[in-house]
Image (spheres, grey):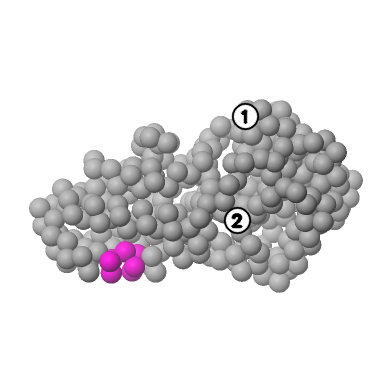
Amino acid sequence: MFGFIKKSLQNVYNQFTAKISSFFNKDVIDETALQDLERILLVSDVGIKTTQHIMQQLRSKNIQNGAALHQAMHDLLYDIITSVPVPAVQQVPAVFLMVGINGSGKTTTIGKLAAWWTLQGKKVLVVAADTFRAAAVAQLEQWVEKNGATFFAGAAKEPAAVVYEGCDQFLQGQYDVLLIDTAGRLQTKTSLMQELGKIKRIIAKKITSVPVYTMLTLDGMLGQNSFEQAKLFKEATDVSGVVLTKMDGTGKGGIIFSVLSELAMPVLYITYGEQVNDIAIFDGKKYVQELLEKV
């Protein structure tokens, strides 16, 4: 991931890294400088609570110059990044239940993950349980089949029934990875809990010896709106981690810290383009290092 932000997330580099780097060269850090820094963090979607925490910590350290500020910022963001345990989602066999609202990049993320696992020599099955959108099923099928994975839509119209059949195929075909797409409608918390709960109970009953992860796709361009979506899903179900999508289209990049700090959700992957290989395992330590690079 070295040089990743500068190369693949140029907007983040130009709008966040370049601005915040100007503070690190200052001979004197006074209250005016700290207020300017606070505004940059807020505009960059770090979030009010997380920004307040960062600024409180910085002020308590009585920082005198840019070099000290750089070290303090690195330590604070590093602590946030490493505060949430990351599940072993790279180990297979495994089941991944993909959730997220329509437009969050869920379908393309599933296609990218299917291709990613296939390139590693794994046998991948993708189950289309978003039965409410025929166009979504067709789009997902195109993404999956052109990259060598197996696609399953099933004959049933009810999502839970499709998942039931898909679990059977996963077991019978001895697949390594099962990716399940779910409906992305904006719903009430109650209906979301009921639908996902039913699907999870089926998976738990059918597949007993394989870990199951629920991965939430969030549009990185929506900033704090995505944060509110994450809160809804966290309240509705157990979320194993987040995939932040479309990160090439935003110059902010701070939502990563609010998701980690305020929701205790690890960021597992980020996507940053239209190509099938435009996906990366999120490396928080390197992200902080590059985000705070001195320009």
What is the CA distance from the residue labelled 2 to the residue labelled 1?
22 Å
Q: What residue sits 39% from the left and 46% below the top?
A: 285
The kind of residue tagged 1 is Gln
Q: Is residue 289 visible?
A: yes
Using residue 275 as the reference point, say whether residue 150 is left or right of it.
right
Q: Which residue is mark 1?
A: 120
Q: Which mark is residue 240?
A: 2
- Residue 233: give x, y in percent of width and height: 62, 63
- The quadrant the N terminus occupies is top left
Name above or below for residue 79 compared with residue 55.
Answer: above
The kind of residue tagged 2 is Ser
Q: What residue sits 67% from the left and 70% below the top?
A: 189
For marks 2 and 1 on the same chain, the one whose residue lies earlier in the sequence: 1
Residue 253 versus residue 269: which sits nearer the camera? Answer: 269
Q: What residue sits 18% from the left and 54% below the top?
A: 68
Residue 79 versus residue 102: which sits nearer the camera? Answer: 79
SS of the residue under disc 2: loop
Name above or below for residue 169 compared with residue 133.
Answer: above
Q: What residue sits 38% from the left and 65% below the top?
A: 50
Q: Which mark is residue 39?
A: none
Residue 116 versus residue 7: which sits nearer the camera? Answer: 116
Q: Is residue 179 visible?
A: no
